[in-house]
Amino acid sequence: MTPPGTGDATPAGDMEEIDPGLARERTSLAWTRTAISFAALGGALLKTTPTVGGPVLGMSALVWGLGRMTHRSGRPEAARRLRQLMITVTVTLVSAVALAMVLLGGGSPPR
């Protein structure tokens, strides 16, 4: 009898080689969860501080749209570059909006 894990089975390779669709699916689900989180936070902030909640709620649509971008175009390299550019612009935009809100005092809840 052979100990578990030392039999004839070949060791599992990279998960991407076993089923390339799983990594893409997990990434898509992660983008969707992030967009839902932005929407929930934006909705909660909308009740207390509409000037902050509105942009956060708007950014949820932007985050969701980035997650829906696919690599299934005829030129996967161009699609990858476009996606990286859009992610960079979105992260920069979210950071700039957050910084502006903090500096302008819009981030403090009413007393």
Image (cartoon, grey):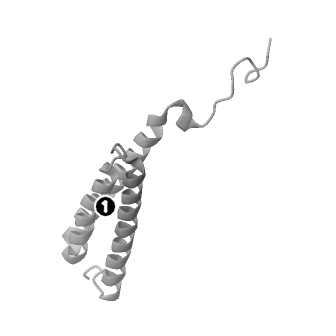
Q: Position of residue 94 (x, y in %)?
A: 34, 71
Residue depicted at 34% across the width and 47% down the height:
70
Residue depicted at 46% across the width and 36% down the height:
22
Q: Position of residue 83 (x, y in %)?
A: 37, 57
Looking at the image, residue 57 lies above or below residue 70: below
Residue depicted at 21% across the width and 77% down the height:
51
Furthest toward the top, the residue is: 1
**Quadrant where the C terminus is found in the figure:** bottom left
Looking at the image, residue 1 lies above or below residue 11: above
Front in this rendered view, residue 61 or 36: 61
Furthest toward the front, the residue is: 75
Total number of numbered labels? 1
Q: Circle 1 sits on which residue? A: 38
Query: Would residue 95 appear left or right of 40 to someone viewing this image?
Result: right
Where, by quadrant of the figure, is residue 80 drawn? bottom left
Query: Would residue 46 appear left or right of 29 to someone viewing this image?
Result: left
Where, by quadrant of the figure, is residue 73 drawn? top left
Q: Position of residue 58 (x, y in %)?
A: 22, 65
Looking at the image, residue 69 lies above or below residue 4: below
Q: Kindly identify the amino acid type of the residue bearing the numbered disc 1.
A: Phe
Front in this rendered view, residue 20 or 25: 20
Q: Position of residue 108 (x, y in %)?
A: 31, 81
Where, by quadrant of the figure, is residue 62 drawn? bottom left
Residue depicted at 31% across the width and 77% down the height:
97
